[in-house]
Amino acid sequence: MSQQQWTAVDEYFSEVLIGHDEPLEAALAAADAAGLPHINVAPNQGKLLHLLARTVGARRILEVGTLGGYSAIWLARALPEDGRLITLELDPAHAAVATANLAHAGFADTVEVRVGRAADSLEQLVEEGGDPFDLVFIDADKPSNPLYYQRALELTRPGSLIVVDNVVRGGAVADADSTDPAIVGTRHMHDLIAAEPRVSATSVQTVGTKGYDGFTLIRVEG
């Protein structure tokens, strides 16, 4: 199997099950024009996030890592009319692109883009003490995954889902001797998950347009 075939299969599924979608395509085009890195989720992965949010009946969603707002659009579409999505982005330029993309998609009043270090924004959310989030999607700097996961636990409730992207790292996550900060952080997060009786989790390997990677799905049990 090759990257070419993985991409062809992803494109087939996206064409058949998603099709033409102007707001999403416009978001990708705007991100590309602004020079943002091509690290957004694939269309079929965005649809998976959307379906997970709908499955749990999410009314409040938190995203860690906005980039150009592509995944935020998928998640916002799963919300009811009175739903709310807060998404955290470090880079002000990325946040500006995302804000425009979300407005174009009709979610200017549904999604709040908070700019700054995610660690600081998460601490602020904990201090604010608002209603718990029903779904948290973590897709930011991988060395900080342990912190993001722990904060997500503080901000959710029993029955909430936490999804962490890019956990396989081309298979490198299996290397216990790795000194790569992204691998060290991802392995540490999995150790924390394994030791936490309040959650149940699994990690899944994937292939597709984004290469060989995967995600971790965590359900808060108590």
Image: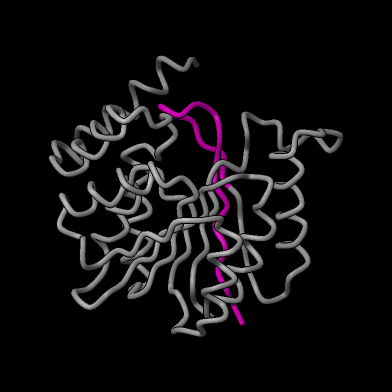
Q: Work out whether residue 210 or residue 30 is closer to the camera in this orientation and state it.
A: 30
Q: Identify the image quadrant of residue 134.
A: bottom left
Tell me the residue at 23%/53% (across/down): 102
Image height of 160 relative to 165, above or below: below
Predominant SS of the magenta segment: strand
Asked if the magenta segment contains residue 120, the reply would be no
Q: Position of residue 194 (x, y in %)?
A: 75, 62
Q: Position of residue 93 (x, y in %)?
A: 38, 42
Q: Work out whether residue 27 or residue 157 is closer to the camera in this orientation and state it.
A: 27
Q: Position of residue 59 (x, y in %)?
A: 33, 75
Tell me the residue at 66%/67% (across/down): 150
- Residue 29 appears left or right of 57: left
Tell me the residue at 57%/63% (across/down): 218
Image height of 164 relative to 22, above or below: below
Q: Identify the image quadrant of residue 124.
A: bottom right
Image height of 172 relative to 61, above or below: above
Q: Position of residue 35 (x, y in %)?
A: 36, 27
Q: Quadrant of the C terminus?
A: bottom right
Asked if the magenta segment contains residue 221, the reply would be yes
Image height of 95 relative to 81, above or below: above
Magenta part of the chain: 204-222
Q: Work out whether residue 212 or residue 92 is closer to the camera in this orientation and state it.
A: 92
Say how many tags the image has.
Answer: 0
- Give the colouring mode of the picture: one colour
